[in-house]
Image (spheres, rainbow, N blue to C red):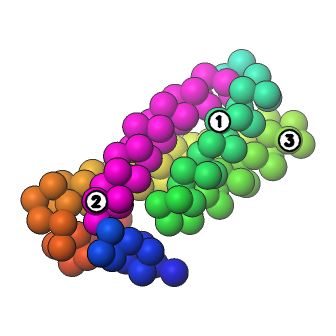
Amino acid sequence: MTLQDAFAGSEDILAQMLGLFETQARERMAQLKTALAVWDVMAARQCLHSLVNISGAVHAYGMSEQTKALGDAVKHDERGMAAILLQALGREADLVLRQTGVLLAALARDPASVWSVVLPD
């Protein structure tokens, strides 16, 4: 199911979801980086759980899958792999947040136009 399949006709709800995602994703990524810098596994896993849920809610499945992979590395105390996966997740989160900004701007201008927006990659 695409974002359009899920939200066409409910663009106001999409705008709310994307706004919440934008705020929470930024916060959770910052918290995650801090937690992993001191290897606070419990705090990292809480952030990861939240990131999986919020990215899935807005159909950012690539981000969700990368978050799950990082969670597995943290769970198995694979610190080197976790560092690599955190960098990859950071790049994916940056991309998804840029795309979210584009979608939010389109929704603010003309909600119906959101489905024809070209997203950055």
Q: 10 Å neighbourhood of mark 3: few (<14), some, or many (≥20)?
A: some
Residues at marks 1 and 3 touching, judged by CB atoms closer than 8 Å = no
At 54% from the left and 50% from the top, the residue drawn is 54
Magenta: main secondary structure: helix
Q: Which mark is residue 47?
A: 1
Tell me the distance, in whole angstroms, between the alpha carbons under discs 3 and 2: 38 Å
Tell me the distance, in whole angstroms, between the alpha carbons under discs 1 and 2: 27 Å
Residue 18 painted magenta: yes
The residue segment tinted magenta is: 11-36
State the residue position of label 2.
12
Residue 10 seen from this side: yes
In this view, the residue in front, 98 or 78, is 98
- Kind of residue at badge 1: Cys
Does residue 24 lie above or below 114 as drawn? above
Residue 44, how many percent across, how many down?
Answer: 71, 32
Does 50 sit left or right of 45 as displayed?
Answer: left
At 87% from the left and 37% from the top, the residue drawn is 77
- Kind of residue at badge 2: Asp
Does 109 sit left or right of 40 as displayed?
Answer: left
Does 96 sit left or right of 70 as displayed?
Answer: left
Looking at the image, tell me whether mark 1 or mark 2 is earlier in sequence order. Answer: 2
Mark 3: secondary structure: helix
Residues at marks 1 and 2 touching, judged by CB atoms closer than 8 Å = no
Residue 51, how many percent across, how many down?
Answer: 59, 46
Looking at the image, tell me whether mark 1 or mark 3 is earlier in sequence order. Answer: 1
Residue 16, how many percent across, how many down?
Answer: 35, 51
State the residue position of label 3.
75
Among all residues in the image, which is located at the extreme top? 38
Mark 2: secondary structure: helix
Depth-wise, is mark 3 or mark 2 nearer the camera?
A: 2
Q: 10 Å neighbourhood of mark 1: few (<14), some, or many (≥20)?
A: many
Residue 121 found in image quarter: bottom left
